[in-house]
Image (cartoon, helix red, strand yellow):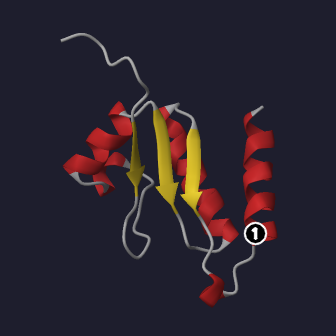
Amino acid sequence: MGAPSKSVAAAHQRGGGGEWSSDSSLSKMERFQLRNSDVITFHSYDPPEETKRRIDSLRRYNRPIVCTEYMARAAREHLRFHFAAAEERTRRRL
């Protein structure tokens, strides 16, 4: 069987946040997903500062990162806060 012909992405989501800063804090499945995905996707319903911290911790995998779910209206989250956080991290990357 050869290499996949399509990109592979597996969403990384931990209920209640959890710690992502080191591989030792992840389950075997989470480590497999992050190490073998071409694109890392994740969900974060946390405030923008926490989402930025998660983005920074996922950068160690040197893959494109996409936060696919990011807003919790019940927590008074607004798109403008998350867009600003994403834009700031994108600029730091360039």
Q: Nearer the viewer, residue 2 or 88?
A: 2
Q: Nearer the viewer, residue 94 or 4?
A: 4
Which x, y percent locates residue 82?
73, 64
For label 1, the SS is helix
* Residue farthest top in this picture: 2
Using residue 14 as the reference point, say whether residue 70 is left or right of it: right
Q: Residue at x 30, y 14 (%)?
A: 3
Local packing at callout 1 (Cα closer than 10 Å; few below 14, some 14-19, many 20+) is few
Q: 2 and 23: which one is in front? A: 2
Give the side of residue 60 with respect to residue 10, left or right.
right
Q: Is residue 20 above or below residue 80?
A: above
Residue 49 in percent (x, y) is at: 68, 67
| Residue in front for this viewpoint, 79 or 17 | 79
- The quarter of the picture where the C terminus appears is top right
Q: Residue at 60% of width from left, 66% of height from top?
A: 70
Based on the displayed image, in which of its 4 quarters is residue 68 positioned?
bottom right
- Residue 44, relative to residue 93: is it above or below? below
- Residue 36 image point, x, y percent: 34, 32
Disc 1 marks which residue?
79
Q: Quadrant of the N terminus?
A: top left
Which residue type carries mark 1? Leu
Q: Residue furthest front?
A: 5
Q: Residue at x 65, y 74 (%)?
A: 47
41 lies left or right of 93: left
Tell me what residue is drawn at x 32 percent, y 42 percent. Answer: 33
